[in-house]
Amino acid sequence: MRIRNIFRHVRAAQNLHFLLGNYQYDPLPSANYIRLLELVPSSDKVVHCSLKPFELHRAPPFQSLSYTWGNPLTSLSKSSSATSRTRRSHINGCISTTTHRDAKSPPPGRDLEDSERTRRHPVICDGQIIKVTANLRDALRMLATSITSKIEVATPKYFWIDALCVNQENIAERNSQVAKMAEIFKASESVIVWLGKEDEFTTDAITTVERISRIPEEDWPLIPYTSFYQRRTCKQYSRLDLTFHNWLGFIVFINRPWFLRAWVVQEIALAKSANVVCGTKAFPWEKLSKTLGFIKTTKWYHHLHTEKLKHISSIQKHPGVYKRVLQAKLDVGVGPVYLDATRVKMTASGRLSVQERNRKPPLRLLLETHRFSKSTDPRDKVYAFLGLADKRMAPFRTHPEALAPNYNLSVQTVYTDAARALLTSYGNLSLLSHVQDPSQTQIPHLPSWVPDYSVDLDPYPLRYRGPGFWKASGGLKWDINVFTMANGFLDVQGYQLSFIDQASVLTTETDDASASWASIVKLALSLEQPYPSLREDNKSPSRVEVLWRTLTTNTYNKQCPAPSSTGTLFIDYILNLQIRHRLTPWSSADEFQPHHSPLSESIYPEWSTLLCLEPLNSPYSFSVYKERLSTVVESMFSGAYSPIGLAQLQHEFDQCGGKKRRLFRTQHNYLGTGPRSLREGDEVWVLDGASVPFILRRSPTGNYKLIGEAYVHGVMHGELLGMGLPRRQITIE
């Protein structure tokens, strides 16, 4: 009787281990075996289950659970700084160079926030206690009680759940089981995606998914980009009858941590079928897939930002439960879109041949595409994609034993081994473009040429800007030295173009709206004429042309080289900057205050000086600018002028210059844009086997540190090879 009463009280339930003892795992019979969990019906709140070993290929039908180890709800914190500090401490706690991992750490790919210190919820397994986190407890209760009728969770009665089916304290077993996770999820009858309990936003989110998924795919291209805000003008959209509150609910929903976990890419991509469960709500993955496909096709992800939606008058007047959401900076990022795209690629059938259907993505593509994903253990940013990668392609084709999961290795070793395998198997230096800005690196003692996969890559490499196919090295091959790479040194060959003489100020480094542009204009003014390289018509480009082509990396809307019409847009952009900067003292205050002093002339961009230096026949001359100014003013008065066409140009600038990359001028009169951390004195190199130049910094040892890739106007297509510069071999450490 006393035991029965204990089971009925939560406080006593938390002390069950004193009565029943902690669960003791029996070793698996062989490496071919897995454990499956069988849920046992029970009338009390404590989950009862049993773990049974089965040979994987002879196992009974089972389902796999995909979930997050920690808090499953979207964080609505106003600032990401605290999150960043927490994330850094978590990463630093996982990078020990010792030969073993803390046995109490959470399973691979799970959230550290809810690790061992919050694994306080008891599960009775074969008469013994296993403690789990709150989210896993909720998932187990969902499975045990079959609270959703849309998923037959009772049949099959077996489940594979990493936290319970793998002995997390046994490093050797964890290495072995992680290596076969892809096989496990492929063998599952289905995958249950547990997103956690419902919140006050879930109903709006599900409404959005249900209505969007009903739109036929052939109608997606017919829905205008602007109809998101003007629903009455689009007959196709009127069928949706979605409110902005519905969309806000979806934004919160899609920002749940599950969508950013590294391991879920494999778990969802390999699933024969998948069902999403959020509290008592459930729906097949295909509905979410169609919703994401719709958002991608219509490009409505541009609109789905809380920073944009909070300015809509109806939302401002009646925010409802979204008041805190509107204060958080949330959007529909690339994470869920790429996650679904990988699954679509893996499950494509009708349109592909048998050979194409059996082709998995290369490891390199997976690492690049899902760089944004998160994992508690930084090593999982590599290990989570091994089972999904095509073993017939690089690096496994030449390194068949490369990169097997081994949690005895340090993070530095895992990342360096991955970089070395990719560099040598591909035989070029394109991987260097995926090295983050040095200011973003988190893993200590990592060679500067090795990507830190534990952090996001922002901005993405220049080659993603469009089909430019730059060949700065002119097709020269890189001579590989595998022996020095094993010691953390990368031997490269190439040409030193010049030293950085001046660098611009980033928009994030100043509170003055015009200071960044002022520094950029000064760089352009410092350019000597003629410019070292010629245009396609063999004429020297003017300062303004060099400036806008550099600021856009000579790419506009995926066109490379950028069309000359982009220069006309740039003149309009300058005009709008002039108006905005001049009006700042008057418009920045809540009320009209004429006593504001004008911007300092030392800060204000010298656009007029730059334009006056243009040749008389230049399309960017001061006279052309004045004519355009008159036209714009007249259009403004008539209500016919709209600067919406500049939005794309602003996007190009954000990606290439002033915000995410820093503009620079070299001692030899070249203008370029490169990583945020570049500084005066850094060297610009064109390396053999690389399509773009790189910024290198000499270290006290005489070797170099990699700072990042660069666009240098006039040397992106092998022009440097005709300059007679000496070819040198250097070492990057």
Image (tube, rainbow, N blue to C red):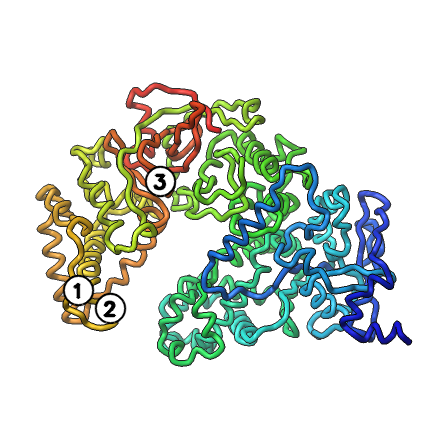
Residue position for label 2? 589
Residue closest to the eye, 724 or 577? 577
Circle 2 SS class? loop
Circle 3 SS class? strand
At 44% across and 40% down in the image, what residue appears? 438
How far separated are the C-alphas under marks 2 and 3? 35 Å
Residue closest to the eye, 298 or 490? 490
At 57% across and 59% down in the image, what residue appears? 259
Q: What is the three-letter code of the residue carrying label 1?
A: His
Measured along the vertical axis of the image, is residue 652 above or below residue 223?
A: above
Query: CB of mark 1 within 8 Å of CB of mark 2?
Result: yes
**Which quarter of the image is occupied by the N terminus?**
bottom right
Labels 1 and 3: the sequence-earlier one:
1
Residue position for label 3? 674
Q: What is the three-letter code of the residue carrying label 2?
A: Ala
- Asked whether residue 181 appears in the rendered view, the answer is yes
Labels 1 and 2: the sequence-earlier one:
2
Neighbours of disc 3 within 10 Å: few (<14), some (14-19), many (20+): many
How far separated are the C-alphas under marks 1 and 2? 9 Å
Query: CB of mark 1 within 8 Å of CB of mark 3?
Result: no
What label does residue 609 carry, if any?
A: none
Measured along the vertical axis of the image, is residue 386 above or below residue 113?
A: above
What label does residue 596 carry, if any?
A: 1
How far separated are the C-alphas under marks 1 and 3? 37 Å
